[in-house]
Image (cartoon, rainbow, N blue to C red):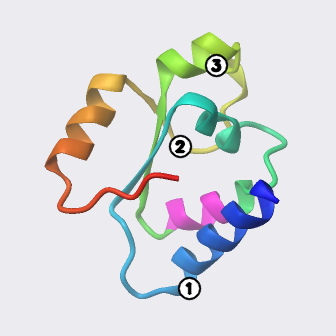
Amino acid sequence: MQTTLIQTYLRTINETADKPSEICFYAEGVFLVIEGSPVLSLLSLLETKGIRLTVCSTCLNYYGLTDQVAVGHKGTMVEIVDTQMQADKVITL
C-alpha cells in the first residue's frame, strides 16, 4: 500500500507543470533513494527535470545505507531544516 501511494505521488509530480524545487529524504524516507527502491526511476526522472533530491547523511549512516544511494545528493540535517524553513510550502509524507 505505501509503495503504491508514493509511486502515485511521484508520478503525479512528474506529470504536473508546477514542480517542487527540492525533495528532502530523512528518517525512513532514505530507503526510497537506495539501490533496489521501487521508485528510483521516478526519482531519477524528477532529478533530470531539475528537482534537487537531498538525502540526510545522518539517517543513511544510522540505517547503514551510505554506500547504497542511487539518486540524489547526501546532505546534512541542517541543510534539510534550512530548506524547510525557507520554503513557502512544505509537504510531509
Mark 1: which amino acid?
Answer: Glu
Q: Give the residue at mark 3.
A: 66
> Where in the figure is residue 86, as x and y percent of width and height?
15, 48
Magenta segment: 42-48
Q: Is residue 43 magenta?
A: yes
Name the residue located 53 percent from the left edge and 53 percent from the top edge: 93
- Mark toward the start of the polypeptide (3 vs 2): 3
Category of crowding for the residue at label 1, using alpha-carbon neighbours closer than 10 angstroms: few (below 14), some (14–19), many (at least 20)? few
Which quadrant of the structure image shows residue 84?
Answer: top left
Find numbered disc 3 in the image and state the secondary structure of the residue it sits on: helix
Left/right placement of residue 87 relative to residue 45 reads left
Mark 2: which amino acid?
Answer: Gly
Alpha carbon distance from label 3 to label 2: 12 Å
> Where in the figure is residue 22, as x and y percent of width and height?
37, 55
In the figure, 80 relative to 10: above or below? above
> Where in the figure is residue 15, as x and y percent of width and height?
56, 85
Q: Is residue 15 magenta?
A: no
**Number of the label disc, if any, that sits on residue 81:** none
Left/right placement of residue 72 relative to residue 85 reads right
- Mark toward the start of the polypeptide (1 vs 2): 1
Name the residue located 44 percent from the left edge and 52 percent from the top edge: 92
In the figure, 31 relative to 87: above or below? above
Label 1–label 2 contact, CB within 8 A? no
**Number of the label disc, if any, that sits on residue 15:** 1
Find numbered disc 1 in the image and state the secondary structure of the residue it sits on: helix
- Between 36 and 91, the one nearer to me in the picture: 91
Find numbered disc 2 in the image and state the secondary structure of the residue it sits on: loop
Alpha carbon distance from label 3 to label 1: 30 Å
Q: Give the residue at mark 2.
A: 72
Mark 3: which amino acid?
Answer: Thr
